[in-house]
Image: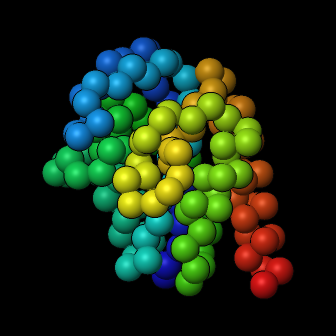
Amino acid sequence: MTGSYVLIIELSEPAEIEVGALGRVDFAAGGYAYVGSAMGGLEARIERHLRDDKRLHWHVDYLLERALVVQVLRLESTDRTECAIARELATRLDAVPDFGCSDCACASHLFFAPELDAVREAAQRAVAATARACSDH
């Protein structure tokens, strides 16, 4: 199974985190939505994100050392849809600049709101809108 996913993440207290090549990033307490893709195995990629024992590779790995994934949304697709989902989220939530998007032209693949429920709702709407757009083709 291939496709994209959104990790709904809760950070219970503010944190300054060293995020690989990005350097130190200040994160406010609240909810985050991280958009990724797995064109070689969706469930394996998600399982990796949920594990505690992993080598720090992606930007989100550094955040997940301090934060908790509370929900995962999936969009199965043979097309790359992560940037479309990120564009949708950018209209609904605040972006964390340059996070998780070093291999595309997006401004970010991590989005924030102080209230976790706002992040959940925005992510669900973004995934649904992207799924509708994909089915129109």
Quarter occupied by the C terminus: bottom right
User: Residue 113 location, x and y as percent?
Assistant: 63, 27
Residue 43 quadrant: bottom left
Pick the front one: 17 or 49: 17
Pick the front one: 70 or 130: 130
At 50% from the left and 18% from the top, the residue drawn is 29
Query: Can the viewer see residue 73?
Result: no
At 62% from the left and 21% from the top, the residue drawn is 114
Residue 17, above or below 39 = above
User: Residue 50 location, x and y as percent?
Assistant: 36, 51
At 35% from the left and 25% from the top, the residue drawn is 25
Residue 133 quadrant: bottom right
At 22% from the left and 39% from the top, the residue drawn is 20
List the single residue furthest toward the top. Answer: 14
Is 71 on the left-hand or right-hand side of 88? left
Is 126 on the left-hand or right-hand side of 107? right
